[in-house]
Amino acid sequence: MIRELYSLAEKIKSLRDAAGITQTELAKMLDITRSAVNSWEMGISIPQTQYIVELARIFGVSTDYLLGVEETATISVKGLSERQVKALCEIINCFNLKNKQD
């Protein structure tokens, strides 16, 4: 249970950082306190189900990904040009190749 909580905490912080959102901004989006978000990210508490669903929506990932049921995250390419999507695919392939070599 401790590892799952830490994993969820890590994912929330990582996704928030990647989105360029502060704890305060995320708290406002969820209509909760900043300290609640901080507690999630520190692994002190676990978000209620309604917030897991809302976090998944905000960050464009599945609830299964947040909860560690699946390791694959999804990336929304909505609104990106074909050229931008191709560039993202090339970057992902580059990382996958690098990981296989390590």
Image (tube, rainbow, N blue to C red):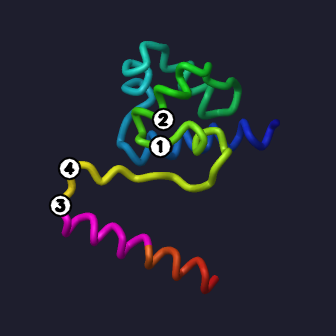
Q: Dot 2 surroundings within 10 Å: few (below 14), some, or many (20 or more)?
A: some
Alpha carbon distance from label 2 to label 1: 5 Å
- At x 65%, y 33%, the residue is 42
Element class at badge 2? helix
Residue 66, how many percent across, how many down?
58, 40
Considering only order in the chain, which callout, 4 or 2, is on the residue closer to the N terminus?
A: 2
| Residues at circles 2 and 1 in contact by the CB criterion of under 8 Å | yes
Element class at badge 3? loop
Q: Which residue lies furthest to the bottom in this view?
A: 101
Q: In the image, what residue type sits under mark 3?
A: Ser
Q: In the image, what residue type sits under mark 4?
A: Gly
Reading the image, the residue beneath label 1 is 61
Task: Tell me the number on the disc at residue 4.
Answer: none
**On the picture, is 56 further left or further right than 28?**
right
Task: Tell me the number on the disc at residue 79.
Answer: 4
Reading the image, the residue beneath label 3 is 81
- At x 48%, y 14%, the residue is 32
Residue 49, how many percent across, how many down?
60, 21
Query: Majority secondary structure of the magenta segment?
Result: helix
Element class at badge 1? loop
Alpha carbon distance from label 3 to label 4: 7 Å
Q: Tell me the quarter of the image containing the N terminus.
A: top right
Reading the image, the residue beneath label 2 is 56
- At x 58%, y 77%, the residue is 99
Q: What is the span of residues highlighted in magenta in the rendered image?
A: 82-92
Whether 71 is drawn above or below 5: the answer is below
Considering only order in the chain, which callout, 1 or 4, is on the residue closer to the N terminus?
A: 1
Q: In the image, what residue type sits under mark 2?
A: Ala
Residue 98, how many percent across, how many down?
53, 81
Asked whether 55 or 37 is in front, the reply is 55
| Residues at circles 3 and 1 in contact by the CB criterion of under 8 Å | no
Q: Dot 4 surroundings within 10 Å: few (below 14), some, or many (20 or more)?
A: few
